[in-house]
Amino acid sequence: MTLSITPFSWFFIFYGLLLILCAAVGYLLGSINSSIILTKLYKKGDIREQGSGNAGMTNVLRSVGKLPAFLTFVGDFLKCVIAILLASLVMRLLGVESGSEVVKIAQYTAGVFCVMGHAFPLYYGFRGGKCIVTAAAMIALTDWRVFLLIISTFLILFIWKRIISLASITCAALYPVYTFLITFFLDYQKGLHSLGYLIFVTAVTLCVGVFVLYRHRSNIARLRRGEEKPITIGKKTG
């Protein structure tokens, strides 16, 4: 009995391998943790042994200072930007039309694995951050409309309560909701994207949202106890 592979099967094998490549690049870039690198450059030791123990911007702000926190933000944001742009470039070099569903799926794949790399960095014992800045970059590059809703929600809550974790948790919960509504009403119903794509992006963003909520479980517990500290604008942090 001879097993033959049809051109249709080759299509899925080829693009499946490309998506694996995008995932690998995203994860390896995501594993570069700016907070750990910068804290050591500032001779402050390991950020994971200070403050809240989180390898992220907010803990750097409180434990090290404003400039390192800003540079952490830039580094965590840019690594996801680079991962998604590389995924897009690979697809375009292969002749895939920019803006097509295949390119969008590659972008989401690179973004999701960059977020995973930030949380579980290969280079730092799989102990990373809570992924807010990296996830924000993913949202910005995969769907700017959803990003505008997310950043507006974040700013409103932060200005109101001054608690970054509260704003982050709320945005994580709303991410799949915003994505579904935007994609369904502005893309799917107008025939711009398929039902399969709608299901894919909704499932992916739901997974990211739930993952970010899980990473913030200690913050959620402190919020429920009223122990989460607000950020005080103008306060000297280092």
Image (cartoon, rainbow, N blue to C red):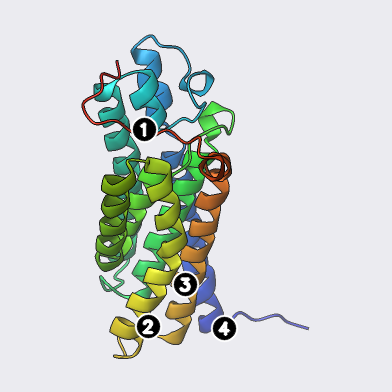
Indicate the secondary structure of the residue bearing disc 1: helix
Residue indicated by mark 4 = 6
Residue 181, how many percent across, how many down?
37, 77
**Structural distance between the alpha carbons of marks 3 and 4:** 30 Å
Residue 237, how many percent across, how many down?
30, 19
Sequence-wise, the earlier of marks 4 and 1 is 4
Sequence-wise, the earlier of marks 3 and 1 is 1
**Structural distance between the alpha carbons of marks 3 and 1:** 28 Å
- Front tag of 2 and 4: 2
Name the kind of residue labelled 4 in the image: Thr
Residue 86 visible to the viewer: no
**Structural distance between the alpha carbons of marks 2 and 4:** 33 Å
Task: Please state which of residues 53 and 123 is positioned toward the viewer in this rendering.
Answer: 53
Residue 231: quarter of image: top left
Label 2 CA crowd tier, 10 Å (few <14, some 14–19, many 20+): many
**Structural distance between the alpha carbons of marks 1 and 2:** 34 Å
Residue indicated by mark 2 = 184
Residue indicated by mark 1 = 57
Name the kind of residue labelled 3 in the image: Thr
Indicate the secondary structure of the residue bearing disc 3: helix
As drawn, the label of residue 222 is: none
- Front tag of 3 and 4: 3
Name the kind of residue labelled 2 in the image: Phe
Residue 201 visible to the viewer: yes
